[in-house]
Image (cartoon, helix red, strand yellow):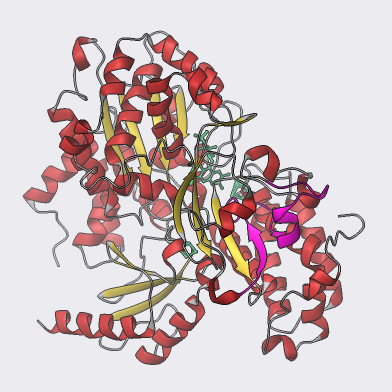
Amino acid sequence: MEIRFSEEKMNKVREIIARYPEGKQKSALIPLLHLAQDEFGGWLDVPVMDYVASILNILPIEVYEVATFYTMFNTKPVGKYLLEVCQTGPCMLNGSDDIIDYIKEKLGIGPGETTPDGLFTLKPAECLGACGYAPMMQLGKTYREHLTKEKIDALILELRGAANN
Amino acid sequence: MAVKLLLANDHVEGIRYYDTYRKHGGYTTAEKAFKMSPADIVEEVKKSGLRGRGGAGFPTGMKWSFLAKPEGVPRHLVCNADESEPGTFKDRYLMEFHPHLFIEGLLISSYALGSNATYIYIRGEYAWIPDILEQAIAEAKNHGWLGKNILGSGFDCEIYVHRGAGAYICGEETALIESLEGKRGNPRLKPPFPAIQGVWMRPTVVNNVETLAAVVPIIAMGGDEYAKIGVGRSTGTKLLSVCGNVNKPGVYEIDMTCSVEEFIYSDEYCGGIPKGRKLKACIPGGSSVPIVPANLLLKTAKGETRYMNYESLSDGGFATGTMMGSGGFIVLDDAQCVVRHTMTLARFYTHESCGQCSPCREGTGWMYKILKNIEYGKGKMSDIDLLWDIQRRIEGNTICPLGDAAAWPVAAAIRHFRDEFEWHVLNPDESQKRNYGLAHYADPIHVPAGA
Ligand SMILES: Cc1cc2nc3c(=O)[nH]c(=O)nc-3n(C[C@H](O)[C@H](O)[C@H](O)COP(=O)(O)O)c2cc1C
Ligand code: SF4
Ligand code: FES
C-alpha cells in the first residue's frame, strides 16, 4: 500500500493545519493521526507515522510518543471491525461482563484478539460516556447501546454480511 | 415544576438546527451580549455565582477575571468536552441535541474573554459529534454569528473542533492544553496557571461544555436573576447524567432544590429502582467522588434531608458526605457488589494514569491488583488495611488531581463497606457465588475509627 493521502485528503490536511496558529502545526498531530489511521488500514504502522511526521515537519519520535499514549491509536493491526465493549463500573452494573463473555464465546477470541478471518477484534474498553445506555460498545465512529445477546447476534451477522459484499 | 434553562427546548423537534433554534429565541442573547462590553459580561457571570460544571466547581466569573491580557498576545478560550469521568455523559447530550445553545454560549464567552480563536477539545470516541458541531458552526457563520466583525462589533471569532484520541487525563486542563499542542497528555506543574500561560504559552481559559452553555441564560436573564435560582452557593441549574440501577437513566436538569430522595424516586427524574430492588449505594458526582450508602445518601449524618446541590451533598465531609462533582449519578441496587464496582474503577484509574508521578502510577496499579484479589476470593485481611494505606499515600502527593480521584473511591468504599470487603476475604468461595447485599445495614452509619 502506498502511504500517501489523496489530493482530497490533502485538502483536509491543509484545512486542519490552518486551524492552529502559524508555526504551531504540531497541534494538528492528533487529528492527522485519526485521518491516517482511517485511511491506512485501521492502525498506525511506523511508515505511516513517519509520513505524518514529514507532513507536519516534526521528528518521527514526536509522533511515536503520541501514538503510543492515546488509547484510540492502534500500533498493531486490528480486525476490520473493532468491538470495544465498555467494562467500567456503570456498564458493569448493567451486565457488560455478560456481554463481553458472550462475544468471547461466540467469536472464540479473548480480549485483544482477532478472529482468524481478520474480521473482528474484541477490546474491552473503559467508560465511553454512554453509561446511561449500558451495556454498550464503540464500533468505528458509532456507539451501539442497550446491548443484548440478541443484538450482538444481529450485529455480527450484519457485519459478516457487509464484509462479504 | 423545576426551572429548566439548558434543556428548556428539549422537546422541540429540530432544535439541533439553526432555523428552529433561531425561531425559539436562539442567538437573541448573543445580540444582547454584543451591545454590552466584555467586562460587563464577566461581571454578570460573576454575579450569577456560576460554578464550573466540569467537576471542581470553581467560580467561573472569578476564573475569567484572572485571565492575563498582555498587549499584543492572543488569548484563547478552550472548551473542555473531554467528558471521560465514568458516569458522566451530560456534555454529550448538550452537544448532540443542543449544539446551537452551546455555540451561542461559546460565542458570548469568546467575546467576553477576547478569544478570536476558540477550540472545543472533544473526546475522540464521540466521533459523530464533531460533524454535528461543525454543521452548527457553519450555520452560525453563514448567518454572521461567527467570522469577521461579528454584528459590526469589530470582534472576530472562529470556533474549531479538536478531537482527542482516548485519554481521560486530557480532561485535566493542563493535560488538555498539552494534548491540544499535539503532545502526550501529561499534566503540567502549576504555576504558571493557564490564565497566564496556557496553550502555546498564551493566556487561556478552560471551561466545561455545560459551564459555557449556562452563560446564555445568565446573560439573557442577568446574573442576579440567575443567582436567585437554587440555594446558597449552588446557583442556577445543573445537568445530571444518571446511570446504574434506576428505572429511567438519562440526562436531567435540576435546579438544585430537590432532595436526593425525590431525585431518585420521583417519576420526573430517575423513577426509582427497577425490579422492586432496594437502593444500596450511590456515587452522585462521577466515579471520583466518594461512594455513600443509601442511609447517608438520603439523609446527612445529622439526620437532615440531603439535597441535590454542592453544599448538601458534601455535608459531613468525606467521613459521611460526598460531592456534586461532574454530576455523573451512579446508582447501585442491593444486588450489586461494592468490591467489584470499586475494582472496575481502580482498573479505570490505573489505565488512565499518565505515569508521571510514582504514587499515582504505582499506587493505582497496586490498588487494582489487591482489589482483584479480594474480589476473586484471593484476598487477605491485611489487604484491606494495605489498600487504605496506599490510597492515603497517593492523595495529595501527585502533580494533578487524578491521584486523588483514584484514591477517594477506594477510601470511601472501605470507609462505608468494610464489612463487605471482610466478608469477601472470610468467605472466598461463597463470595464467588453471591453478593453481600444489604447486610451492612445492621450497622447503619458504619464509620470505622480513624476513617
Ligand atoms: C483527571 C481529571 C479529569 C478531568 N476531566 C474533565 C472533563 O472531562 N471535563 C471537564 O470539563 N473537566 C474535567 N476536569 C476538570 C478540569 O481540569 C477543569 O477543572 C475544568 O475543565 C474547568 O472547567 P469548569 O470550571 O467550567 O468546570 C478533569 C480534571 C481532572 C483532574
Ligand atoms: S497524578 Fe497521575 S495522572 Fe496526574 S500527573 Fe501524576 S501520574 Fe499523571
Ligand atoms: S461506564 Fe460504560 S460508558 Fe460509562
- The image shows a total of numbered marks equal to 0
Q: Position of residue A45 (x, y in %)?
A: 29, 64
Seen in the image, is B200 located left or right of residue B296?
left
- Position in image of residue B115 (x %, y %): 35, 21
Please check the rendered image and state whether residue B281 is part of the magenta-colored stretch, yes or no. Answer: yes
Question: Is residue B321 on the magenta stretch?
Answer: no
Q: Foreground residue, A99 or A108?
A: A99
Instruction: Write down the quadrant of residue A36 in the picture.
Output: bottom left
Identify the residue at image location x=73%, y=77%: B374
Q: Nearer the viewer, residue B85 or A36?
A: B85
For residue B348, above or below residue B222:
below
B411 left or right of B111 in image: right
In front here: B161 or A26? Answer: B161
- What is the residue that sits farthest to the front in this orientation? B1
Q: Main secondary structure of the magenta part?
A: loop
Would residue B72 be seen by someone viewing this image from the given angle? yes
Q: Which residues are magenta?
A: B277-306
Q: Point out residue B116 in the picture as x, y percentages from the top left corner.
A: 30, 21
Answer left or right for B244 relative to B282. left
Identify the residue at horizontal 24%, vertical 42% (top origin): B15
Q: Residue at x 52, y 16 (%)?
A: B65
Camera sees residue B353: no
